Image (cartoon, grey):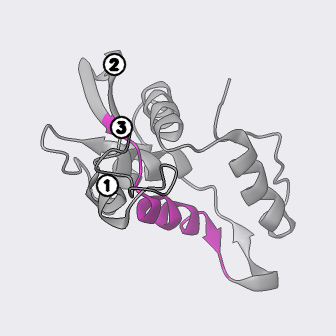
Amino acid sequence: MTTPLQEPGTNGALTREGILGISDLTSETCPVPEWGGSVLVQGLTGEERDEFEASCVKGRGRKAEVNLHNLRAKLVVIVCRDATGARLFTDDDAPALGRKSAAAINRIYEVGARLSGITEDDVEELLGNSSRGRPGASPSGSLARSA
């Protein structure tokens, strides 16, 4: 039996219309006791993830360097949403957000990374591709999951 997302007679292959029409972003409420409440965290779209990853690298080619500055706040400004799904913060809010509680920012970062499919392997790949440009950069300083 096929669903509206599947093409009849194709062993369950999905249709273009089905894929483009489905709502597939997940969200979760994240408690932030440091701020006296909670925030809605939504996983990144493919485009948002590419933009986030691009913001973590300065330069191109052999001159590319990993840019870890305020990394967690950069993700947090993208994944925090209001009840309608609109972003709570703009990219310009990242520096101010980076001056907030590290525990709060990290908690939201971890939820956002998990919902977006950002794994330790992804972070290691980013660091491995560009670590030559950043003294002391190492995959062991994991960004996807911190202690």
**Residue 53 magenta-drawn?**
yes
Q: Is residue 42 above or below residue 48?
A: above
Q: Does 123 sit left or right of 41 as displayed?
A: right
- Check if mark 1's residue and mark 2's residue have beta carbons within 8 Å: no
Between the C-alphas of marks 3 and 2, the distance is 17 Å
Magenta extent: 41-59
Q: Residues within 10 Å of mark 2 (few under 14, many from 20)?
A: some
Examine the image and state in which quarter residue 83 appears: top left
Using the image as rendered, state which of residue 43 and residue 17 is in the foreground.
17
Examine the image and state in which quarter residue 108 appears: top left
Q: Position of residue 41 (x, y in %)?
A: 33, 36
- Secondary structure beneath disc 1? helix
Q: Residues within 10 Å of mark 3 (few under 14, many from 20)?
A: few
Q: Position of residue 107 (x, y in %)?
A: 47, 27
Q: Which of pointers 1 and 3 lies earlier in the amino acid sequence? A: 3
Look at mark 3 in the image and give the residue it sits on: 26
Residue type pointed to by label 2: Pro
Using the image as rendered, state which of residue 110 and residue 13 is in the foreground.
13
Q: Which of pointers 3 and 2 lies earlier in the amino acid sequence? A: 3
Q: Position of residue 75 (x, y in %)?
A: 45, 49
Circle on res. 19: none
Residue ID at (23%, 19%): 37
Q: Which of pointers 1 and 2 lies earlier in the amino acid sequence? A: 2
Instruction: Note whether residue 96 is visible.
Output: no
- Front tag of 1 and 2: 2
Look at mark 1 in the image and give the residue it sits on: 93
Between the C-alphas of marks 1 and 2, the distance is 20 Å
Residue ID at (32%, 44%): 3
Residue type pointed to by label 1: Asp
Examine the image and state in which quarter residue 99 appears: top left
Using the image as rendered, state which of residue 16 and residue 91 is in the foreground.
16
